[in-house]
């Protein structure tokens, strides 16, 4: 499989400029982007929360129905048109290694994805898409990869025997690292100790044997007679897919083996250089978290090491700091969107990630699509995601609210929180005591390579057709032509710190801080209560302290140790600060009732 994370041409151009260029001082001047000048009035507490909850729930359902096609691409469509794991191989994994993947009907559960409930019968969990859903797919063989929904369609246990999906939320169960590590274990199992070409041949033979048996005994095993719109994945469709795979088995299996082996190898190399002492835990994976920058750049580093002159620069491509983060809430993006300054030279007041280093939504989504290192990136995924997420309503808090206490919390929020946590606040916050590793992951080579690749896929003249018709999504942003500098912030303007985003739907964003090291809002406001370790990724919810269950009451999840590695610090946002003569209370240890009132108010956002 072709990996296009950083262009070799970009690397060689940098080489021509001289090795010293890559070693120039990184201690560049940083720009403090201004906070919005408008005063933000916090939302009023609804008089009847249950009526408000019904209205918001209905409004979100109507929005998703209106944006049906965009939502479908977000949930169902893979990142590449013609690259990824062949559908046939993916569906055979539980058959060849049930001890790793579980039974066929539970596929996805072992790495944190859950079954569909859309009635289509598609034999893939939410978060894995296949090219066969697209009528204009360019290949005879169906390919699969993860979708936006893998990370951003989460779940919560409502406590009444029902589990609700959270669109645009956080899938705290998803363990992307485990998927790839388990895939390699499965390949090793089939290879039976063989190496090189013999390894690939053993794997091919094992897969073909399983496929021949299925073809003879279960003509709808792979696709289950599923459908998607007018497309039917019946026995005839399945037979054609099997025949296409068998006709090209050497190539398809070889590509898959190379992709998985290289993915795990490259990521392991990155961990050795960046996560010293924490490699073993990282290779087990941390559900709800990922090091996307490290994964992407490790692919590029591996490519460079195959080029003589590139070996000088391979290490330079890797992030200089760990970039492990929790997945983010991605709804309500219009309130996180950057804006041009007065002369149109700089994007300020916004940015969708924790540090806002890719401020324009289409490129931010494109960056996420390219993380897997697949060729032939489908720009429509990023474009549809931008269309969906701009106005996607936050998930309303699904439990009861004490509106009287929430009104008290509204006043406290206005006094102490609203100046920072307001829409489109693009200011950089560096003095909050939070570990800054994640904000320091970019370097000159990553920025140059990233811009080059993003422009290759989506330049000013690139056209893509959505349900509304053809558009040029990368021609302009907010009424101005997109410049190279706007795609990724130059180092001198890069955030060496974090944004304070608006808190719509914050109840669903637990655990808190960018590295997910604080279980609940209560612990955030009462910093002396923050546990050193806790259960993460449980689905049952603590309505008193605002966060998913983390202690003995947690159902499922895994133990997360905030002291195991330096970048997973639970410190930060834990001391009062004074700015422009005004003191903001961040540590509520001496006023628990005040903290609980703010918590009650946050439920209503």
Image (cartoon, rainbow, N blue to C red):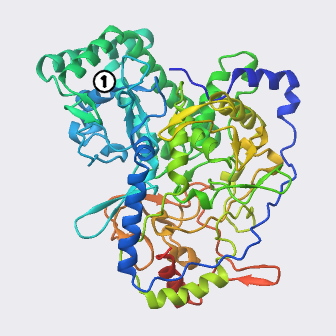
Residue 558 shows in the view: no
Q: Is residue 78 above or below residue 16?
A: below
403, 534: nearer the viewer: 403
Q: Residue at x 41, y 86 (%)?
A: 402
Q: Residue at x 40, y 26 (%)?
A: 85
Q: What residue occupies the far front of the structure in this picture?
A: 469
Q: Quadrant of residue 433?
A: bottom right
Residue identifier under label 1: 88
**Where does residue 307 sit, x and y in percent of width and height?**
69, 16
Residue 36 shows in the view: yes
Helix or strand or loop: what does disc 1 sit on? helix
**Where does residue 487 sit, x and y in percent of width and height?**
71, 41
Q: Residue at x 27, y 27 (%)?
A: 92
**Where does residue 510 sit, x and y in percent of width and height?**
48, 65
Q: Is residue 578 above or below residue 171?
A: below
Q: Is residue 141 above or below residue 343?
A: above
Question: Label 1 crowding class (10 Å Cα cut-off): few <14, some 14-19, many 20+?
Answer: many
Q: Residue at x 74, y 68 (%)?
A: 36
Q: Is residue 170 left or right of residue 524?
A: left
Q: Quadrant of residue 155?
A: bottom left
298, 374: nearer the viewer: 374
Q: What residue occupies the far left of the structure in this picture?
A: 217
406, 338: nearer the viewer: 338
């Amino acid at each position: 499989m072709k990996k296009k994370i950083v262009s070799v041409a970009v690397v060689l151009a940098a080489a021509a400029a001289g090795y010293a260029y890559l070693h120039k001082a990184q201690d560049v001047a940083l720009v403090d982007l201004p906070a919005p000048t408008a005063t933000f009035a916090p939302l009023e507490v609804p008089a009847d929360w249950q009526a408000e909850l019904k209205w918001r729930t209905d409004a979100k359902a109507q929005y998703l129905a209106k944006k049906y096609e965009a939502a479908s691409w977000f949930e169902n469509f893979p990142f590449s048109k013609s690259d990824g794991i062949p559908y046939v191989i993916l569906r055979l994994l539980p058959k060849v290694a049930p001890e790793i993947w579980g039974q066929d009907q539970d596929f996805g559960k072992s790495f944190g994805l859950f079954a569909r409930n859309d009635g289509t019968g598609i034999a893939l969990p939410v978060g894995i898409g296949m090219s066969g859903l697209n009528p204009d797919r360019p290949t005879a063989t169906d390919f699969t990869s993860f979708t936006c929904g893998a990370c951003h369609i989460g779940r919560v246990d409502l406590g009444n025997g029902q589990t609700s999906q959270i669109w645009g939320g956080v899938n705290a169960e998803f363990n992307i690292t485990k998927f790839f590590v388990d895939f390699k274990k499965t390949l090793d199992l089939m290879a039976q100790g063989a190496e090189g070409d013999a390894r690939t041949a053993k794997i091919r033979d094992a897969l073909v044997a399983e496929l021949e048996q299925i073809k003879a005994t279960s003509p709808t095993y792979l696709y289950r007679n599923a459908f998607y719109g007018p497309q039917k994945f019946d026995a005839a469709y399945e037979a054609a897919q099997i025949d296409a795979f068998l006709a090209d088995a050497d190539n398809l299996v070889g590509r898959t083996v190379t992709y998985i082996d290289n993915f795990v190898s490259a990521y392991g190399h990155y961990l050795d250089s960046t996560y010293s002492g924490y490699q073993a835990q990282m290779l087990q994976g941390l559900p709800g978290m990922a090091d996307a920058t490290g994964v992407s750049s490790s692919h590029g580093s591996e490519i460079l090491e195959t080029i003589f002159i590139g070996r000088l620069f391979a290490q330079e491509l890797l992030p200089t700091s760990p970039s492990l983060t929790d997945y983010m809430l991605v709804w309500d993006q219009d309130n996180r969107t950057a804006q041009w300054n007065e002369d149109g030279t700089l994007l300020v007041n916004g940015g969708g990630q924790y540090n806002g280093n890719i401020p324009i939504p289409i490129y931010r989504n494109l960056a996420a699509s390219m993380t897997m290192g697949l060729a032939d990136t489908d720009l429509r995924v990023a474009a549809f995601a931008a269309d969906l997420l701009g106005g996607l309503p936050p998930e309303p808090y699904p439990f009861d609210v004490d509106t009287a206490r929430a009104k008290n919390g509204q006043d406290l929020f206005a006094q102490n929180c609203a100046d920072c946590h307001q829409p489109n606040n693009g200011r950089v916050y560096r003095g909050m005591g939070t570990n800054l590793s994640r904000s320091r992951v970019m370097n000159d080579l990553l920025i140059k390579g990233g811009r080059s690749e993003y422009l290759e896929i989506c330049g000013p003249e690139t056209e893509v057709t959505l349900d509304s018709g053809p558009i040029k999504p990368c021609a302009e942003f907010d009424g101005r032509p997109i410049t190279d500098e706007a795609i990724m912030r130059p180092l001198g303007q890069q955030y060496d710190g974090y944004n304070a985003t608006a808190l719509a739907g914050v109840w669903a964003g637990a655990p808190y801080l960018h590295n997910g090291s604080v279980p609940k809002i209560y612990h955030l406001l009462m910093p002396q209560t923050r546990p050193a370790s806790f259960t993460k990724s449980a689905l049952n919810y603590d309505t008193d302290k605002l966060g998913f269950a983390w202690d003995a009451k947690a159902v499922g999840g895994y133990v997360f140790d905030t002291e195991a590695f330096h970048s997973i610090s639970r410190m930060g946002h834990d001391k009062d600060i004074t700015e422009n003569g005004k003191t903001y209370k961040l540590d509520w240890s001496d006023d628990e009732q005040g903290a609980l009132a703010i918590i009650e108010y946050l439920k209503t956002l």
